[in-house]
Amino acid sequence: MQDKAYAQEIARRILDRFEQPFVIDNVEQYAEAAIGVAVFDESVKECEDLYRAVTLSLYRANEYGRNSYAFFNREFRRSSGEVYNLEQELRRCIADGMRNFELTYQPVFAKDNTIHHYEALLRWKSDNAGFVSPRVFMRLMEKVGLDTAIDFWVIPKACQFCKRMQEKHGDNIRVSVNLTVHDLQGGSVSTVVSNALSETGLSPSSFIVEIPESAHLLAYNEASSTLGKLKRLGILICIDSFGNEYLPLNTLKFSYVDLIKVSSSFITNSGDKFDEELVKTTIYLAGSRNIEIIVKNIEHKAQLEAAYSYNLNILQGGFLSLPECEDKYLG
């Protein structure tokens, strides 16, 4: 039990540090952590058992919420075994050449009802569980570091789709893909994008990368370097889910931000005057930098009307159009 108490103290000290801001380039930034802990005892005897125990503990820590830790116990095997098996199946599908993965494309509409661009959305069908929510399998992939392999498969395919759409409908067609924290920190994604553009002959201005707001990526040196490389290629950069967690308004002053994407809840959950002014301020600051605002998750008429009330006219969601496979668009 002494080892467990010591590990608990270390975990608490680490998480206490994450409660404090990290100062990067004179800007306070916050990060979050989840820690899974397993003690090498009678219940964990082999290296494989230890890896599985720590993985299951990490899943449980994430379920507890921000800056949490969890120790392994036997109950995790029962409650988290399904998630662990899902991870193993994902690994096998990726190793088998992205078996059971499919790209769909959802249109993003401009104010005149023309297509602003198409967002590439990944779908995965488990042999055992059927179609799995992207939120579930992408979060799982990020935890184990396999999201980069997925995105490097998506980027060339999205470029090919966009080029074929341009040949059919004109050069104004654009496509966006979502990048993860690992993509931006790794640094190789700019080479993958550059090669995909070169091989397909797609103009860089027809390609948009969406990066997560919640990770405070703009403060990381590795990410900043990667974003700089992507920007120099001539592609467009969009901050996804802007305002969902941190609302870093200072992000809007960076010259490499071309678009921000907000959820419909950002403009419909304004319960008081402060919330309403916050939305207006975000819109004003974005406009001052010629940053376009996209409202996503438009799922019913009231959300559409709320977007129009703020004069936001670049819209995406199931109420307007559902994602479709490539064949649906190209025939």
Image (cartoon, rainbow, N blue to C red):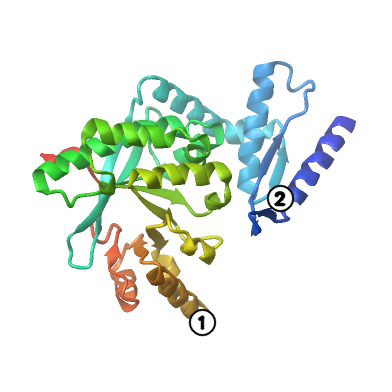
Residue 200 visible in rendering: yes
Quarter containing the C terminus: top left
Residue 1 visible in rendering: no
| Left or right: where 160 falls relative to 266 | left
Q: Give the secondary structure at mark 2.
A: helix
- Separation of residues labelled 1 and 2 (CA atoms): 31 Å
Nearer to us of marks 1 and 2 is 2
In the displayed structure, 68 sits above or below 99; it is: below
Q: Identify the mark at residue 272; answer none if there is no mark.
A: 1
Dot 2: few (<14), some (14–19), or many (≥20) neighbours within 10 Å? some
Residue type, mark 2 in image:
Phe
Q: Identify the mark at residue 18; answer none if there is no mark.
A: 2
Quarter containing the N terminus: top right
Nearest to N terminus: mark 1 or mark 2: 2
Q: Residue furthest top?
A: 46
Foreground: 12 or 181?
181
Q: Residue furthest front?
A: 232
In the displayed structure, 150 sits above or below 321; it is: above
Residue at image coords 32%, 78%: 309
Q: Residue furthest right?
A: 2
